[in-house]
Image (tube, helix red, strand yellow):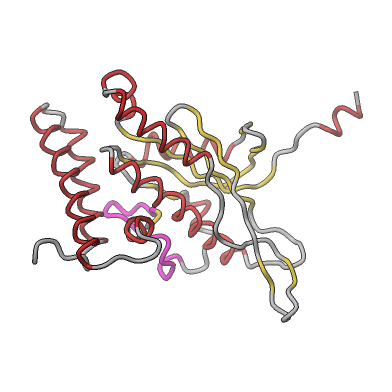
Amino acid sequence: MSGQADADPALEMRFALFFDFLGSSQAAIGWPRERVYDLVGTLIAVSHAQSAQDITGAAQSDGGSKFTIVPEVTTFSDNVLVSYPTASDGDVKLLDSLWTDIVCQDAIRVLSSVAEMALRIGVLVRGGLSCGQLYHQDRVCFGEALVDAYRIESRIAVNPRVVISEKVITRLEKPDECHSVRRDGDGQWILNYYPALFPRAFPSGAEPEQASRWKAAHLQTIDRQIALSREAQDHGVREKWECFKDHFTSATLHIVVDGQ
């Protein structure tokens, strides 16, 4: 028995990003098959997410260091969990604040890509980011970090945004100077992924005309969803789309549409 106990998986301190897709329950029962396939394709893309950033400590020949991080990703139904290790001793020890900021940046990388794909089919993303004890390996996930991230998503976020736990914010030395996070109108700290939507759609850059068409198409989708929810007198859904429109337009002010 002792040998088996020694082999048992251990919880470790990890960051947990939990998010889901608003409106997906209606998709499962009411959407045409082609549109459902688009949503499933988005979930498949999320499940294959890999880090483009270098974040594990390894000494380099020039005296510097290279860092690599690959987040654990699990999808179940329309829910997604992405987790990252917290700062730890190794070949190179990062300040906890720097590591936390890097994790937030990579969370934005994942979220902006997913949210942009989801927006194309009329779906919004909402989530929570926390940290704590967590086991997340081989598609198995369990622990307080997941519970807290889910609690934030389901009870605090409300609108299409990703609210950040104070457990994460306190790890940042100067959150007000960190571009990856910002305070929302109600005082909650959120991941500032909105400005990254456009760069993720055009990683190699885009001409002004392309950028304008991209913004116009998404605004058309947003306005259509607002109109549909108004006709259905679904005030909750309408408020979510209006909230997202505010974030989207603020983040894309530099993109001009129709000379406006």
Relative image position of residue 151 (x, y in whole percent) = 45, 35
Residue at x 35%, y 59% (from the top left corner): 202
Left or right: residue 113 versus residue 119 is right
Q: Residue 135: say if magenta.
A: no
The number of discs equals 0
6 up-or-down from 114: above or below: above
Left or right: residue 26 versus residue 189 is left
| Most distant residue in the bottom direction | 62
Residue at x 36%, y 52% (from the top left corner): 188
| Magenta span of residues | 175-190
Relative image position of residue 86 (x, y in whole percent) = 63, 54
- The quarter of the image holding the C terminus is bottom left
- The quarter of the image holding the N terminus is top right
167 up-or-down from 147: above or below: below
| 70 and 107: which is toward the camera | 70
Instruction: Give residue 124's quadrant in the image.
Output: top left
Residue at x 71%, y 58% (from the top left corner): 88
Residue at x 57%, y 45% (from the top left corner): 83
Instruction: Give residue 233's quadrant in the image.
Output: top left
| 99 and 53: which is toward the camera | 53
Q: Residue 181: say if magenta.
A: yes
Relative image position of residue 12 (x, y in whole percent) = 69, 44
Left or right: residue 102 versus residue 136 is left
